[in-house]
Every structure is written in C-alpha cells, then in structure tokens.
Amino acid sequence: MKHLLIYIIPVLLSLSISACGGGGETEVDCSNNEVVDFNRFLGIDYGTEEHLLESKLGKFTGGAFTSDSSSFIYSFNRVNRVPISVWVNAKTGKINTIFMEVISLGENFDADLEAAVQEFSIDPCDVVWFGMSAKDIKGKLGAPAEEAVSAEGVTLLSYDSDDFLITVAFKIYEQQENKCSSISINWFHADSDILLDED
C-alpha cells in the first residue's frame, strides 16, 4: 500500500498541474479570478522587497535604471523568447511592476511558455492567462477599465482593483493568433512616488 501511494501522489500532482496549464486552452479553476488576486504573480507577493527577488526568480541576466533613476529594472532573460522584467522602486526597494511576455509564434508559443514554467517554477494559475483570447479574459475578469486596439492590431485590456492598488494589463496580438502573450502587473504602494506602466 505504501508503495502504491508513492506512485499515485506524483501522478495526481502532475494531473492537477497540467489541468491549470495549456496557455488558456483548458478551462481551469484557479483562485486568481479577480484583479485583487494579482497581489501575487510569478511567486512574488505584493510588498516584496528587492533583496528577496533573487530567491523568487533566481539569477537576473541584466538590469538598468530608468531614465529618471527612480526605479531599477531587473531582466530575467534565461528563456529564449520569454522575457521577464521586474521594476523596483529605487527609494523604497519595493517591487512595483512585474512584466512577462511570450514573443513566440505558432507551435513555439506553447513550447517556450512551458520552458519558462520549468525554468522559473511558475504557478500554473499564473500561466493560464497566456494564450487566452480577449473574450476569454473578459469572461473571467469582466469588463476592463480600459480597452484599446492599436493600428498594428494589438488589443490592450487593463483592469484596476477596487482600491486602485493593483493594475493588470493584458496584450493580445493578431500575429500570435489573437492570443494573450503579454501580462504586466503594476502595484501601488503608499510609500511609492510612482506607478510604472508597461507600454
């Protein structure tokens, strides 16, 4: 019986993980169905400070100050075609923005996303948004605070939490079969002077 449990538990865990993945192709039951639930993303919690960043995402691959030196941007480009960057307020040391994008086309989209999941140990319920259509996102989060379509065919959906401390922006690209491939999480802090926005 003991040996049977040792075999069954990993199988059940793998099934529950794959049920939450798949770039939006599978209906999943995750807790982040409201904007306020984006107080955690890529293993980083709202209020996390700079010195804890490496323990969350591992070694960064580059970084630079913004033009006004108000924030430092850490780059985590360890997976081809899946850049991740994190903005840290230079004054408070708190994380303001987390940005992740999958720039792959066609069949590479899912393969590169899975590579990022493995490299950064990403929660399956964070991954589920990638690959969703604009309609799917609105079906889960409701009407966005802002919706716009650029001349290049890029759809932006932006959501605010009720207290305006969290903003989540999704971008959906025509050339990627109208899949969501870009997510930006912006966190306001009472002791922050700025809110960073990903264009």
Image: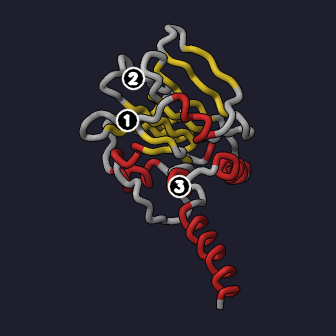
Question: What is the three-letter code of the residue carrying label 2?
Answer: Leu
Q: Nearer the viewer, mark 3 or mark 2?
A: 2
Residue 128 — which label? 3
Q: Where is residue 183 drawn, in percent x and y?
A: 51, 39
- Determine whether, in the image, residue 43 is placed left or right of residue 64: left
What is the x, y in percent for residue 38?
41, 45
- Residue 25 in the image, given as x and y percentages of width and height: 56, 61
Using the rendered image of the protein, determine whether residue 192 is visible from the camera's viewpoint: yes
- In the image shown, does 7 or 129 lie closer to the viewer? 7
Q: Name the secondary structure under disc 2.
A: loop
Residue at point 33%, 42% (across, down): 144
Which residue matches tag 1? 167
- Cα distance, mark 1 to mark 2? 10 Å
Residue 19, picture quadrant: bottom right
Q: Which residue is mark 2?
A: 195
The residue sitting at 65% across, 91% down in the picture is: 1
Q: Judge the density around disc 3: few (<14), some (14-19), many (≥20) Cα neighbours within 10 Å.
A: many
